[in-house]
Image: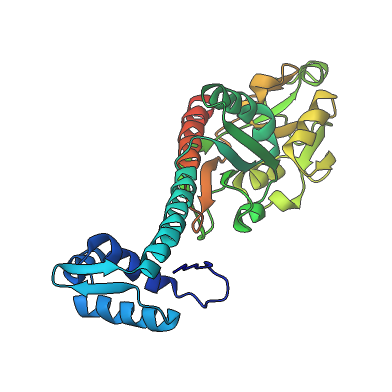
Amino acid sequence: MHVHFKMGIGVNWNWDHIRFFLALSENGTLTDAAKALQVSHSTVLRRIKSFEKQLDTKLFEQRPEGYFLTLAGQKLFEECSKVKQRIQAISQQISGLDHELAGEIVITTTDTLAQYILPKALHEIQTDYPSLQFTLQMANQVSDLNNREADIAIRPCLKPPDDLIGRKVGNLKFSVVASKNYAREHRLVGYPTKDQQLRFIRLDKSYSELPFYGWFMDRIGESSSQTVVNNFINAAALARADMGITLLPSYILEHEQDLVALTIEGTIPHNDLWLLSHINLRNTDRVKLVKDLLYKALRKKLI
């Protein structure tokens, strides 16, 4: 007698029945199959009977020593075993992906961190883990992380949004700066007084809620000549071009040889730097690794 099963074709397969069928086939008794499945032996028997009725085929012969496959059962066991092995192989491959130190990591951060700090840090990480690939996105807001388009966000803020979790790297400090030429031309050593006829470069009102913004605006004076920019990269570029005095994250000065910090009275309100991820995103091993390495690199460089 020739028996042929076409898996998935022509039969409305109940895959849970197959799980019970395989357990009884491999264990030989209702008791052992029930232990393997962590159900009662009556449940195993009921499922097997239901499966045989669905197929209109007898799959087992019951003998005193246990259950033995019929010819049809043997053929079905061969086919189902192939499917089981394939599913197990795919499962292992998928679960292994999260533990491989390879693959893409999407990082979103500010323009200045992307330009001045992260290139060297990412280079060092990729040198040690060459199978990692990075996508670096520059944005000065957390919307891309909220949309779950990024694995990691490196953001300055005083308090992260509730749907983001992370680790505070430390305090970001700021400096009042000008080009060396501008400072020399106007004989600047410290922060100028409001009555001096000087030019200033300031950020636009999108930064108005940040502590350093009000501090700087209070010291500019309404009558001063002002150039308005929407990010620190533009502010640094204009300062290099002798356009006036501006406020920049202090770490930029290490990379801008044409700029000099002016002395001030007191301290400029700082901002906090955070390493963040979305609360609903899984942290794979590679994401956890990169977050840890970036934290150490940022601490070393900025704090």
Side of 219 relative to 1 (left or right): right
- Asked whether residue 244 appears in the rendered view, the answer is no
Q: Please state which of residues 170 and 134 is positioned toward the viewer in this rendering.
A: 134
Compared to residue 131, the image places residue 285 above or below, namely: below
Residue at (83%, 17%) from the top-left corner?
185
Q: Quadrant of the N terminus?
A: bottom left
Q: Answer with the quarter of the image where residue 40 lies.
A: bottom left
Compared to residue 173, the image places residue 185 above or below, namely: above
Compared to residue 253, the image places residue 81 above or below, namely: below
Percent position (x, y) of residue 67?
23, 69
- Asked whether residue 8 appears in the rendered view, the answer is yes
Residue at (42%, 65%) from the top-left corner?
76
Q: Please state which of residues 1 and 276 is positioned toward the viewer in this rendering.
A: 1
Percent position (x, y) of residue 203?
75, 43
Q: Residue furthest left?
A: 64
Side of 83 relative to 188 (left or right): left
Q: Residue furthest front?
A: 1
